Image (cartoon, rainbow, N blue to C red):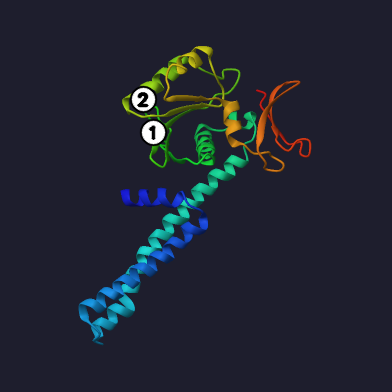
């Protein structure tokens, strides 16, 4: 089971065409290596046993292994592509705040994936012990706590942040992200500023992480308008795409 999870993590980090070609490569490698081993052990004789292993048994065993890898590859890519579809369909704070908490965690995972992290959901079927996502990027490891908040009660208190810092400290982690669709109270922000390994991400920051214009897919940048801060396409005025950050 641990081998399957490791394989799924590896295949979910690569492009679909690479992941789906992995089973073919595995089949060729296993079959070729086994055929060479048979020739080395039994020599060039044409016995029925050698022919049976060479023509049927070895390819069948290699096919079974490649077939299992195919299942894992397809599942990992469907999971990955599902995150991206969810990411593209939630471009405003209103829709983000309306999501069920499980979907919100998947959205946050997609946002971190857009930044190059490999995100793994945890605690989907029970208590998460303060950790909703495990992040990996090379040798870097981090955890994420997600808090779905709906207005008017959309605040995350300092007590919630303190508890998460305790999880980071207990795990001896170098980085932790606290993500909410709402906003952090001034006390929570002040406390977090004293913890170097902690980063707070509120709803507006989460939209910035998406980083794409909804019209032309170019980058977006924060600007101040008549009704407050919004995300404007960097190609403005050629493109008037924007993301509203208003609550």
- Number of marks drawn: 2
Residue 223 coordinates in the image, percent (x, y): 69, 26
Q: Residues within 10 Å of mark 1 (few under 14, many from 20)?
A: few
Q: Position of residue 134 (x, y in %)?
A: 41, 36
Kindly report the distance in space between the C-alpha atoms of the residues bearing marks 2 and 1.
17 Å
Figure check: 28 above or below 112: below
Relative depth, front residue between 89 and 115? 115
Left or right placement of residue 1 versus residue 153 in this view = left
Residue at 49% over, 15% down? 188
Label 1 residue SS? loop
Q: Nearer the viewer, residue 165 or 39?
A: 39
Q: Residue at point 48% right, 52% down? A: 14
According to the image, label 2 marks what residue?
167
Image coords of residue 242 (percent x, y): 71, 33
> What's the residue at 63%, 32% (across, down)?
95
Which residue, as the protein is rendered here, is positioned at the far left? 41
Q: Is residue 222 visible?
A: yes
Mark 2 neighbour density, 10 Å: few (under 14) some (14–19) many (20 or more): some
Q: Position of residue 118 (x, y in %)?
A: 45, 42
Question: Counting residues from the N terminus, which is met first, the one under dot 2 or under dot 1?
Answer: 1
Q: Are marks 2 and 1 in contact (CB under 8 Å)?
A: no
Q: Which residue carries the number 1 mark?
A: 126
């Amino acid at each position: 089971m641990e081998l399957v999870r490791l394989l799924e993590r590896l295949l979910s980090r690569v492009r679909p065409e690479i992941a789906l070609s992995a089973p073919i490569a595995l089949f060729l490698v296993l079959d070729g290596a086994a055929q060479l081993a048979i020739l080395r052990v039994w020599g060039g004789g044409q016995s029925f046993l050698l022919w049976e292993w060479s023509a049927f048994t070895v390819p069948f065993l290699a096919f079974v292994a490649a077939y299992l890898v195919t299942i894992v590859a397809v599942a990992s890519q469907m999971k990955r592509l599902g995150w991206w579809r969810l990411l593209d369909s939630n471009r405003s704070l209103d829709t983000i705040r309306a999501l069920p908490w499980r979907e919100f965690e998947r959205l946050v995972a997609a946002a971190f994936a857009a930044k190059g992290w490999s995100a793994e959901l945890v605690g989907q079927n029970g208590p998460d012990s303060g950790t909703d996502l495990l992040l990996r990027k090379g040798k870097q490891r981090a955890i994420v706590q997600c808090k779905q908040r709906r207005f008017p009660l959309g605040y995350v208190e300092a007590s919630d942040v303190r508890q998460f810092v305790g999880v980071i400290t207990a795990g001896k982690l170098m980085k932790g992200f606290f993500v909410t669709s709402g906003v952090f109270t001034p006390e929570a922000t002040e406390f977090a500023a004293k913890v170097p390994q902690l980063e707070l991400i509120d709803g507006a920051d989460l939209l910035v992480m998406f980083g794409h214009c909804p019209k032309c897919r170019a980058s977006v940048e924060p600007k101040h308008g008549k009704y407050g801060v919004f995300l404007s396409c960097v190609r403005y005025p050629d493109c008037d795409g924007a993301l509203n950050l208003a609550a």
